Structure formats: structure tokens, C-alpha cells
Image (tube, rainbow, N blue to C red):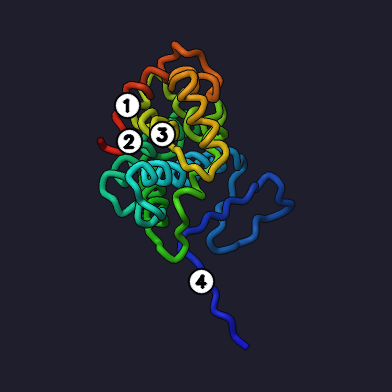
Amino acid sequence: MSVDVMVEPFYEWVVDASQIKGPRPQIAGVTFVDDPMPYIERKLLTVNTGHATVAYLGYARGLATIDAAIEDPEVRDASSKALEETGLLLAFEHGFDPDELQEYRQKVLARFENPRISDEVTRVARAPIRKLGHDERFVSPALRLLDMGRRPTRLAAVIKAVLAFDHPQDAEAVELQETISAEGERAALARYAGIEEDHLLVDLVLESPDPTGG
């Protein structure tokens, strides 16, 4: 009996060369690196940040799936610009070539278009409180960009969309909305992001436009 297996064309295979004894094997598709951490962070701040960005922006616009969300021109443009900001950070901190990062971003965004591996935006966006964490995929790069002297306005707009995530079947979303209702967006964001209420990032987020476009 034969079994057809659906796969996607996008993949990454980065291998820590420092752990290899003897000559490096010749394996198609493998990138050997002496320090894998920059590549791990490139994946986190492009694939993970991008996936969640499309989910939150898609939810705000009433779109049900990741592929439907990335087909929305405004979601795609906002997601691409948010990843341009994380790309600035990756180039600055790890020395990645900007042109290679741009190509990598486009491959990642194209991956989200595939309806055969798509997911519901509510599943990808789940646990918004965790995703607002100080060392997580949105707040961490935004804070580091501020340290560089850059204003992460696009990431701030995505964080605004995270604050607006009100899916009633998600326990963290319910808690988030209860906290915002009781204390306000400023206090809620500061608490969950682990920063002061008067932090510039909080100001940038609160100044961001309504993620629903309303």
C-alpha cells in the first residue's frame, strides 16, 4: 500500500558545525554554522513573529485562517513591515546580509499562503499574555530596536492587535480583556511586558491605529 504525504517546499536545516568530529559531510540543503544561535533567532523573529503577526492582524479583520489573512493586502503589508523591523535587528546584532534577510522574509510570507498547511488564526494567536512577555517575539525585538535608537512603530501596531485579541474560548484572551477593562491598556501592557507604564514602547503601542481599521 502506498501513502501520499503532503509536504511544503519551505524548510530550514541548520547544523552546529562545532559538534562535528572530522570532515563535514556533504548533505544537500544543510547549512553548517559554527554558532547556531543567530539562525535560531532569525527563525524566531521571522517565522514565529511573522506567523503570530498574521494571526493577530487577521483576527482583528475578521479573517478565519492564516492563508486568508495573508491574502488580505493590508495584513500582508503590515506583516511584511513588522518583519522588516525584526530584520533590522537581526542585521545589526548578528550581521546577516539585508538582502538575504529580505529573501528569507519573502519565503516565510509565501509559506503562509499555502492553504494545505494553513491554520486557524485563533489557534496561532492563542495565549496572548505569554506572547506579550518581555522576552517574547514582539516585545523583545521592539525593546532592542529602541536600544538601537529605532522606533519600532510596526511592531508596536502588532502589539496593539495582540491587546485587542478577545477570543472568548482562549483563557488568556479572557484574562487579558478583563485586565484591560479593569486597569486600562497602559497598565495591562506594562504588566505583561515587564516594563514601566511610562516606557516609550507603551506610548508607541497606544498611539498605534485601531488594528481593525475602524
The answer to whether mark 2 and mark 1 are in CB contact below 8 A is: yes
Question: Which residue does the numbered mark 3 point to in the structure image?
Answer: 164
Q: Residue furthest right?
A: 21
33, above or below 159, in the image: below
Determine whether the residue tagged by mark 3 lies in a helix, strand or loop: loop
Label 3 vs 2, first from the N-terminus: 3
Give left or right: position of 39 versus 86. Answer: right
* Disc on the earlier residue, 3 or 1: 3
Question: Which numbered disc covers residue 208?
Answer: 1
| Residue 68 in the image, given as x and y percentages of width and height | 35, 56
The answer to which quarter of the image holds residue 116 is bottom left
Q: Quadrant of the C terminus?
A: top left
Q: CA distance from mark 3 to mark 2?
A: 8 Å
Residue 14, position as x, y percentages in the image: 58, 51
Q: Which residue is mark 2?
A: 211
**In this rendering, position of residue 168 left or right of residue 210:** right
Q: Amino acid at mark 3?
A: Ala
Residue at 41% across / 55% down in the picture?
65
Q: Is residue 8 above or below residue 16?
A: below
User: At numbered mark 1, what does the secondary structure look like: helix, strand or loop?
Assistant: loop
Q: Secondary structure at mark 2?
A: loop
Q: For mark 3, does the 10 Å Cα neighbourhood hold few (<14), some (14 to 19), or many (20 or more) residues?
A: many
Identify the residue under disc 4: 6
